[in-house]
Amino acid sequence: MGTLEAIFGDLFPRTHLPPAVIILRLVLAIGLGAVIGLEREVRNRPAGLRTHMLVALAAALFAIVMIEVLYSEIGVQTPTRIEPIQVI
């Protein structure tokens, strides 16, 4: 088991959020984006299903990355306070 952790440790580093939560959030974002996009497709509006799915996925991924950055301690030599609103 130690060998597998050594191999996959660099590929899948530890995260603040459990992997199941990350996957659930991304799938939920795609699903909710699809609902909005489908409604726009039915009404023949621009920016339909695929566009809204991709935008929702990108927003959720950005939020997850921001959470991970806020809770990461990689390379921190002095305690700093990162404000999420500054990144946005």
Image (cartoon, grey):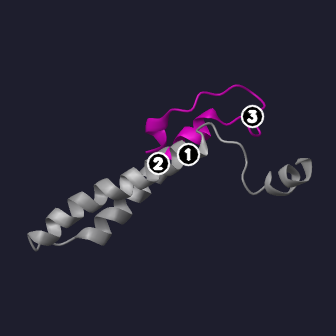
Q: Which residues are magenta?
A: 64-88
At x 56%, y 32%, the residue is 82
Q: Is residue 5 above or below residue 67?
A: below
Q: Nearer the viewer, residue 87 or 9?
A: 9
Which residue is tagged 3?
76
* Residue type at the position of mark 3: Val
- On the question of residue 45 being in view, the answer is no
Res 33 → quadrant: bottom left
Image-quadrant location for residue 37: bottom left
Mark 2 neighbour density, 10 Å: few (under 14) some (14–19) many (20 or more): few
Measure how far apart labels 1 and 2 are at the Cα level.
Answer: 6 Å
In the image, taking residue 6 as reference, residue 49 lies left or right, namely left
Q: Amino acid at mark 1?
A: Ala
Within-10-Å neighbours for mark 1: few <14, some 14–19, many 20+: few
At mark 2, the secondary structure is helix
Q: Which residue is mark 2?
A: 24
